[in-house]
Every structure is written in C-alpha cells, then in structure tokens.
Image: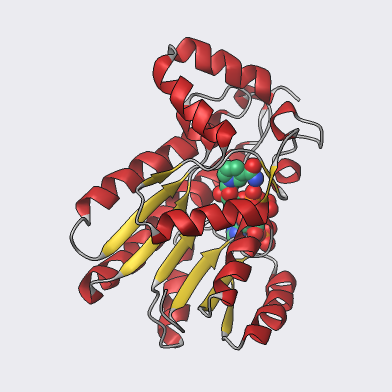
C-alpha cells in the first residue's frame, strides 16, 4: 500500500471498524472516520494521529436517508480523494420479525444496505476515473442462509455479498476492486447492539476484532472478490453449498436462539 493515501471507514467508533482504522493508521493512511458517536471518533483521532497521519472526524447517522451524500460533501470540502472505502457500519437484531421494533428493522436496512450502496455509488466512479481504488464491504457468515430470529440482518448481509460480487465483476480491468468480506462471530459491540445477551451460542468462540480486520485488509490487498476468514466461516460456506436450505435455516435458527 502506498503512503498517505486516504481511507474512509464507517462504523469506526467500535469493534471491527475501530480495528480497521487502527491497522490502516499503522500503514500510514489518512483516515476519514464515520459513526454516530462523535466523542469516540474524537478520541480515536487523538490516538491515530500519533502515527503521523491525519484523521478526519465525520459524525453521521447512516440510518438517515441520503446520509452518504453528507459524507461525500464532507470529503469534497476537505479536498480528499478516497482511495480505500471500508463499508463496515452495521448492526443486527435478535428475535422474531413479527415481534420486532419496526424502526430498528428499517434503520438496519438503511445502514446495512442503503448507506453501503450509496457510499459505493458516491466513490466508485472517481476510483474508476483514477484507475485505482479498493472497496471492502462487510457482509457476514450470515449471508450463507436464511436466518430465523435475525431475519432482516441475514437478508441484509446476503444483499451485501451479492451486490459486492456483481459490482466487482463490473469493474474488472479498471484498477478498482470490490471485496465482500464475510466474517463469523467476532468479539465486538455486535451482540449488545443486536440484543443477543452475552451468552449466545454463536459467540462462544468469537474471534478477535484485530485478527478479523487483518484478514479483511489482506483479502482486499489480494484483490479477492469474496473472503471467508477462519475455519468456522469456511466450514459454513462449504456446507451451505451442499446442504438443502431447509437444513441450513434450521441450523441458523438453533444458533440464533438466545
Ligand atoms: N461481530 C460479528 O460477529 C460480525 C460478524 C460478521 C459481520 N459483522 C459486521 O461487521 C460490521 C461491524 O460490526 P461490529 O461487529 O464491529 O459491531 P459494533 O462493535 O457494534 O460496531 C458497529 C459500528 O457501526 C456503527 N453504526 C451502527 N449504527 C450506525 C448508524 N446508524 N450510523 C452510523 N454508524 C452506525 C457503530 O457506531 P455508532 O454506534 O457510534 O454509530 C459502530 O461503530 C457490521 O456490518 C456487522 O454486521 C460483524
């Protein structure tokens, strides 16, 4: 990776986004950090700028329609080209759809799908024009099957995987890459945000955010279209192709019951 290019990381205030930002700072990227919690982003700016880079704090609620345009205006006002886009912000929700909070489901679609898609739309044409750029979109092991008790979340991650895979094919030969990154359970703020409690079966052997983020950046650097880091995710990916969907969705239901 070249020195002092600029990366934009959404969801940088916690978990995987925080780990991505720290790793990119060590590689001397300037970084635009996006999330709602401005205090966390300011703390992160102070920490990361010790690496001799510039960090730009962009507090935005991605659940608001057209939030991505605010981010684009911000980066334009700072005169920044985005060389690496990490569409990481996202969250889930535990429980049956019929009993769920509509606003949370709707926000999930906005953050996990619409904002990711719109940020890609905002920055991809300039990357193509410059003949270089990398986009890493956070999908999940949840993309492999339907996910009873987390239905909207699993569906959102299936969207991310399919969308990223398709666009990666469209941009072939332009110098731009799009990677769908599909991690398994990782120790972050995810469980709490999804109201899963702290003892869900899924998270008993969660990987560390730093290890997972490293695997994501490696996949992006290797220009991979799809990446399933870790043994659990690789096994799930393999069996999801072999087993009937009625079996995989029942398995997912078992894992998702908290
Ligand atoms: N942890 C896992 O097991 C796992 C596995 C596979 C994939 N993933 C994916 O990894 C990504 C990162 O999640 P994580 O595990 O690191 O969870 P996390 O620790 O809860 O971090 C989620 C990040 O998203 C941001 N975010 C949430 N809602 C937002 C909104 N409305 N506007 C702006 N930012 C928002 C949060 O920032 P604020 O709260 O400050 O806004 C936070 O920085 C997600 O896309 C998740 O689906 C996670």
Q: From this viewpoint, which residue is outermost toward the left? A: 173
* Residue occupying image coordinates x 66% and y 30%: 100
Please name whichever residue, 214 or 6, is drawn nearer the observer in this view of the structure: 214
Query: Relative to 248, is 220 above or below?
Result: below
Closer to the camera in the image, 36 or 230: 230
**Residue 243: image x %, image y %?**
44, 13
The answer to whether 137 is drawn above or below residue 158 in the figure is below
Which coloring applies here?
A: secondary structure
User: The C terminus appears in which quarter of the rendering?
Assistant: top right
- The N terminus lies in which quarter of the figure? bottom left
Residue for point 47% across, 20% down: 239
Tell whether 207 sits left or right of 110. Answer: right
Mark yes or no: residue 152 visible.
yes
Numbered disc total? 0
Question: x, y (%) of residue 250?
Answer: 57, 13
- Residue 97 location, x and y as percent? 60, 26
Where, by quadrant of the figure, is residue 199 drawn?
top right
Along the line of sight, the residue nearer the viewer: 64 or 135:
135
Q: Residue 221: name its quadrant.
A: bottom left
Question: Which residue is located at x 53 percent, y 43 percent?
Answer: 229
Is residue 63 visible in this depiction of the protein?
A: no
Is 13 displayed left or right of 252 in the figure?
Answer: right
Horizontal side, residue 43 vs residue 112: left or right: right
Q: Is residue 110 above or below residue 74?
A: above
Image quadrant assignment for residue 126: bottom left
Residue at the (47%, 72%) spot, across then down = 7
Q: Is residue 78 above or below residue 65?
A: below
Residue 56 percent across, percent down from the top left: 57, 81
């Amino acid at each position: 990776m070249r020195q002092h290019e600029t990366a934009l990381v959404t969801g940088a205030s916690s978990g995987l986004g925080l780990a991505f930002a720290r790793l990119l700072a060590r590689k001397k990227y300037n970084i635009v950090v996006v999330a709602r919690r401005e205090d966390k982003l300011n703390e992160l700016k102070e920490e990361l700028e010790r690496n001799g880079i510039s960090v730009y704090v962009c507090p935005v609620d991605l659940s608001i329609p057209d939030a991505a345009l605010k981010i684009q205006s911000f980066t334009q006002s700072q005169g920044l080209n985005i060389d690496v886009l990490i569409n990481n912000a996202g969250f889930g929700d535990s429980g049956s759809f019929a009993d769920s909070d509509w606003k949370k489901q709707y926000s999930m679609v906005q953050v996990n799908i619409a904002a990711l898609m719109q940020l890609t739309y905002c920055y991809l044409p300039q990357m193509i024009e410059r003949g270089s750029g990398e986009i890493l979109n956070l999908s999940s092991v949840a993309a492999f099957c339907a996910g009873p008790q987390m239905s909207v979340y699993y569906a959102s991650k299936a969207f991310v995987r399919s969308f990223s895979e398709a666009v990666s094919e469209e941009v072939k030969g332009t110098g731009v890459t799009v990677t769908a990154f599909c991690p398994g359970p990782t120790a972050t703020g995810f469980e709490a945000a999804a109201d899963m409690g702290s003892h869900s079966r899924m998270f008993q052997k969660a990987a560390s955010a730093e290890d997972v983020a490293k695997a994501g950046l490696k996949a992006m650097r290797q220009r991979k279209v799809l990446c399933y880091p870790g043994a659990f995710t690789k096994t799930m990916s393999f069996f999801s192709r072999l087993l009937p969907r009625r079996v995989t969705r029942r398995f997912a239901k078992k894992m998702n019951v908290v």
